[in-house]
Amino acid sequence: MYGWIWRHLPGNTLVRSVLSLILALGVVYLLFQYVFPWAEPLLPFNNVTVDDAQGGISR
């Protein structure tokens, strides 16, 4: 897949490297702005229950 993308980018190696970096940053941006916020309510990481079973100091 990465080879296919590399072969289809225009320019020499320097231009392809810059374009690859821009594409990677674009994918990361899209993930953090749209995909992760959409998926966060579907993940069980916020359902945390803390039980003070040992009788520690309560605040």
Image: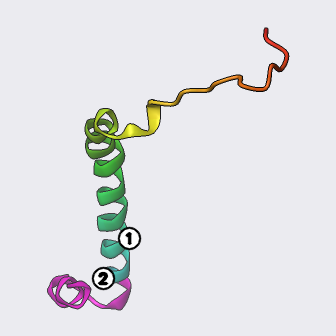
Residue 14: x percent and y percent?
38, 85
Is 53 situated left or right of 15 in this image?
A: right
Q: Quadrant of residue 39?
A: top left
Q: Which residues are magenta?
A: 1-14
Magenta: predominant secondary structure element?
A: helix
- Name the quarter where the C terminus is drawn: top right
Amino acid type for the residue under numbered disc 2: Arg
- Name the quarter where the N terminus is drawn: bottom left
Q: Which mark is residue 16?
A: 2
Residue at numbered disc 1: 21
Residue 33: x percent and y percent?
32, 40
Nearer to us: label 1 or label 2: 1
Residue 6: x percent and y percent?
24, 86
- Secondary structure of the residue carrying tag 1 is helix
Residue ID at (25%, 37%): 38
Most distant residue in the right direction: 57
Amino acid type for the residue under numbered disc 1: Leu
Q: Callout 1: 10 Å neighbours few (<14), some, many (20+)?
A: few
